[in-house]
Image: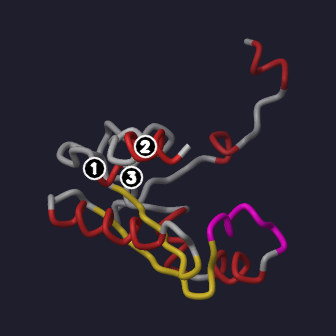
Amino acid sequence: MYRTFATKGMDPDVSPLFGVSKDLPPALVLTAEFDILRDEGIQYAMKLKEEGVPCDWKHYKRAFHGVCNMPYSLVRRDMYVDKDFVLLVQVRPCTSTKICVENKKCNSQGYGEMSAESLKTPSPDEERG
């Protein structure tokens, strides 16, 4: 198993840290104090910024890998009421028509405006078309 990972560990498809960053869309990098991938996340955010890719980076103390998927975690609750987290994740500035699929128009502050319709979960009939 180690040999398999060792040969692919520097593959950009496995670790974007080793890929080409130019021409990437704006990025949001979240790191957690107790995440085994914390250092790689920090390095990736720094690399993106150094190469001129717009990048928002937010580090959460007391957080751990996968915390956003744990609905009863106190750390997740704290993140979701953090003004910075909400602004970064929910209402990121819409800066490019190429990457703003859901956010079809921007308000005067540059934030994408999402309609309630775009947030609606499709019914099984709607998914089938």
Label 3, label 1: how many angstroms apart (C-alpha)?
33 Å
Q: Give residue 128's position: percent from left, percent from top.
A: 77, 14
* Type of amino acid at the residue the image marks with label 1: Phe
Q: Give residue 90's position: percent from left, percent from top.
A: 55, 62
Q: How is the image coloured?
A: secondary structure
Label 1, label 2: how many angstroms apart (C-alpha)?
9 Å
The disc placed on residue 106 is: 3
Q: Give yes or no for residue 92 being in the magenta stretch.
A: no
Lower position in the chain sequence, tag 2 or tag 3: 2
Label 2, label 3: how many angstroms apart (C-alpha)?
34 Å
Q: Give yes or no for residue 66 being in the magenta stretch.
A: yes
The disc placed on residue 18 is: 1
The disc placed on residue 14 is: 2
Q: Closer to us: mark 3 or mark 1?
A: 1
| In the image: residue 66, left or right of residue 83 | right
Residue in the picture at 39% in, 58% down: 107
Q: Give residue 82's position: percent from left, percent from top.
A: 59, 82
* Type of amino acid at the residue the image marks with label 2: Val
Q: Which residues are magenta?
A: 65-72
Disc 3 secondary structure class: loop
